[in-house]
Amino acid sequence: MLPLTEEQSDMPATAEQVISIDHVAKTYGETRALVDTTFAAASGEVIGLIGHNGAGKSTLMRIIAGITDPDEGALVIAGEPIAGGRGLSPRRATELGIRVVHQELSLCANLRVYENLVIRYPGGAGRAGGGTAGL
């Protein structure tokens, strides 16, 4: 997973990089979810991440959102180096402006898209005091 080149992107090369991931790796037992993964996003970019099941998309997003620590690699968010990629909490990621919309199959059909993104889930997994969908 690499960022687009300047020719592939509408963003100028001088755009401020707000997320930078360098040589990140994550394994779960024998499963290598991420291997030597590099990714960057500039201020103002909207990025969609697509790939086959098991490609590491969710793992990468969980690392960026502070839910999962990488085993290796460097992570810089909003100019703030995250020590070895570790120590980024979901709360700190939110304070840094990170939002992740996770795949959710149980949306509320009677609500608008943005309303589904702000639903509070009391006591949601990994969220002290409940969480918000999409954060």
Image (cartoon, rainbow, N blue to C red):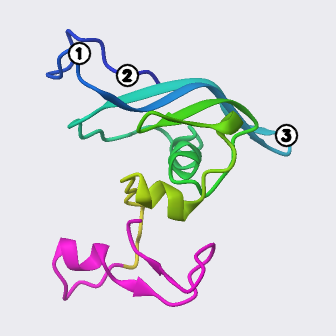
Secondary structure character of the magenta stretch overall: loop
The answer to whether 25 is drawn above or below residue 132 in the figure is above
- Residue 84 lies left or right of residue 111; in this view the side is right
Q: Residue furthest right?
A: 29
Q: Evaluate if marks 1 and 3 touch, with contact meaning CB atoms under 8 Å apart.
A: no
Q: Residue at x 44, y 37 (%)?
A: 51
Marks 1 and 3, the one that precedes in the sequence: 1
The answer to whether 18 is drawn above or below residue 5 in the figure is below
- Secondary structure beneath dot 1 equals loop
The residue closer to the viewer here, 4 or 66, is: 66
Mark 3–mark 2 Cα distance, whole angstroms, equals: 27 Å
Quarter of the image with the C terminus is bottom left
10 Å crowding of disc 2: few (<14), some (14-19), many (20+): some
Total marks in image: 3
Residue denoted by label 3 = 30
Marks 3 and 2, the one that precedes in the sequence: 2
Looking at the rendered structure, the kind of residue marked 2 is Pro
The residue closer to the viewer here, 90 or 119, is: 90
Residue 60 x, y percent position in the rendering: 55, 42
Residue 93 in magenta stretch: no
Residue 129 in magenta stretch: yes
Residue denoted by label 1 = 14
**For the magenta stretch, what is the residue range?**
107-135
